[in-house]
Amino acid sequence: MVVLTYVYVIIIDKININGDFVLKDIILGEAKGLGIDIIGFTDGEVFSELQPVIKDRLDKGFISSFFHVDIEQNTNPLIVWKDTKSIISIGVSYKHKLDETKIDKSRCSISRVAWGQDYHNILLEKMNRLMSNITREYPDIKYKAYVDNAPLLDRAVAHRSGLGFYGKNGFIINKLYGSYIFLGHILTNIELGKSSELDDCTTCRFCSRCIQACPTGAIKEGYDFNSNKCISFFTQKKELLSREERKYIGKMVYGCDICQEVCPINKTAKYSNEAAFVPLKDVVRPKIKDIINMDNAMFKNIYKSSSAGWRGKKILQRNAIIVAGNIKTEENYQLLKQTLNDSRWDIRMYSMFSLLEYGERGMNEIKEKLNGEDEEFRKNFNIYC
Ligand code: B12
């Protein structure tokens, strides 16, 4: 039981129903050795309390196109995998320091979610290593590991496994690590018992900083969230962005941290020990021109291996062009003049949108170019400018 009494943040109240303490001890010990900061367990029961919540969000049009809604699958572990008996839920902290005082304000930003290496790979590797160490001793154990890619909701699984409570911004907040934790879960065919679910947090009860801070109003009272209004979603969606959406992007090339940065629990949260998420200043606060001029080799070597890479190189360049319209400098103006001649129609269109932010000068710059574009282009330009 030495490991159980160690630093793990959660309390396991119902140990293995077979009375087998050994296996759970081994899992906890292995997890700690692999840099898994938080771990909890739950059973394969249906998450029936989520069904009306998902339906309500769906009806309101609050669910983004990135999440496939199938309420049965999203809430029933047995439909995801018929052999599920318990779920191991993990959290890995990614709060690292970055000295912003030494960074030029004209640079653009990559949110914490994409600092260092892609969290999907890091968490999946940890979970697979954990389970292969276990199955070496217990070959009858079968499992399936997920990060973001399960039909089940990572947050709901984490909540029921005692990893943290829900913040008003929808995040799973852990008392020690705050909300800067990536989540993953493993479905297994063995009984592992259940951790205690946590009640809501008293700090949150009297706090609504995240709701007030979100510029778009995506976070609503009552633990409600419109993902189609989330700035992070704007930076990732491929459809044309309205002027309002482009303004909200501000200087973000990928993701958004606003609702987490203002959270008082995150201010005092423990820092991460995970070397894979350590940020490199020039990568996470890049020069706008470096993103705009990025070639395939730079994308492959730097951003493709981070979680900012999944939408491709062009989406980061599009966002950098938007930022060049939001941060008005002569250098950015010259960059936009250059991208106005890009071979990709959407890059040309966003260059025009951003040049318009420079007033008459920008308008004169694009006039002739716009006339040279086809009718479809001009139609979209007029709708979205
Ligand atoms: C698609 C997606 C997005 C979309 C949509 C997000 C959304 N919240 O709807 C976009 C691109 C906007 C996005 C943004 C971000 N994401 Co995201 N995203 C996902 C993904 C893949 C699916 C989420 C989703 O659409 N779920 C559908 C909705 C209906 O479910 P839900 O958000 O989990 O909320 C449900 C329950 O958790 C529950 N619930 C929520 N709050 C409460 C409160 C109470 C009291 C109760 C009872 C229930 C309850 O009810 C909700 C409806 O059923 C998940 C991974 C996963 N598979 O779960 C990551 C995930 C939610 N994202 C994550 C992160 C880190 C981010 C960003 C911070 C990235 C960034 N820096 O830009 C932002 C934060 C935005 C935010 N405030 O939520 C983490 C969150 C970790 C955590 N500690 O909570 C996750 C879990 C990924 C991971 N594996 O670590 N994301």
Image (spheres, rainbow, N blue to C red):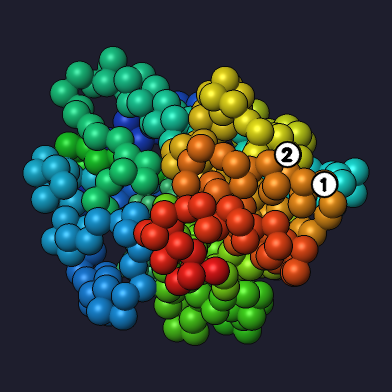
Query: In the rendered image, is residue 5 in sight?
Result: no
Q: Bin the neighbour count of mark 1 within 10 Å (Cα to Cα): few under 14, some 14-19, many 20 and up.
A: few
Q: CA distance from mark 1 to mark 2?
A: 9 Å
Residue at position x 34%, y 67% from top?
A: 63
Q: SS for tag 1?
A: helix
Q: Bin the neighbour count of mark 2 within 10 Å (Cα to Cα): few under 14, some 14-19, many 20 and up.
A: some
Residue 42: % across, % down: 30, 52
Residue 382: % across, % down: 48, 70
Left or right, 81 with reference to 284: left
Q: Residue furthest right?
A: 102
Q: Which residue is under mark 1? A: 331
Whether the residue under disc 1 has CB within 8 Å of ligand 1? no
The picture quadrant where one finds residue 329 is bottom right
Query: In the rendered image, is residue 82 in sight?
Result: yes
Left or right, 281 with reference to 190: right
Q: Amino acid at mark 2?
A: Lys
The picture quadrant where one finds residue 21 is top left
* Viewer-nearest residue: 17 or 223: 223
Of labels 1 and 2, earlier in sequence is 2
Report the quarter where the C terminus lies: bottom right
* Viewer-nearest residue: 357 or 253: 357
Where ligand 1 lies, by image quadrant? Answer: bottom left
* Viewer-nearest residue: 85 or 225: 225
Residue at position x 25%, y 79% from top?
A: 59
Q: Nearer the viewer, mark 1 or mark 2?
A: 1
Residue 186: % across, % down: 30, 39
Residue at position x 24%, y 51% from top?
A: 151
Q: Does residue 71 sit above or below 55 in this rendering?
A: above
Q: Amino acid at mark 1?
A: Glu
Residue 243: % across, % down: 57, 70
Q: Are marks 1 and 2 in contact (CB under 8 Å)?
A: yes
Q: Which residue is under mark 2? A: 289
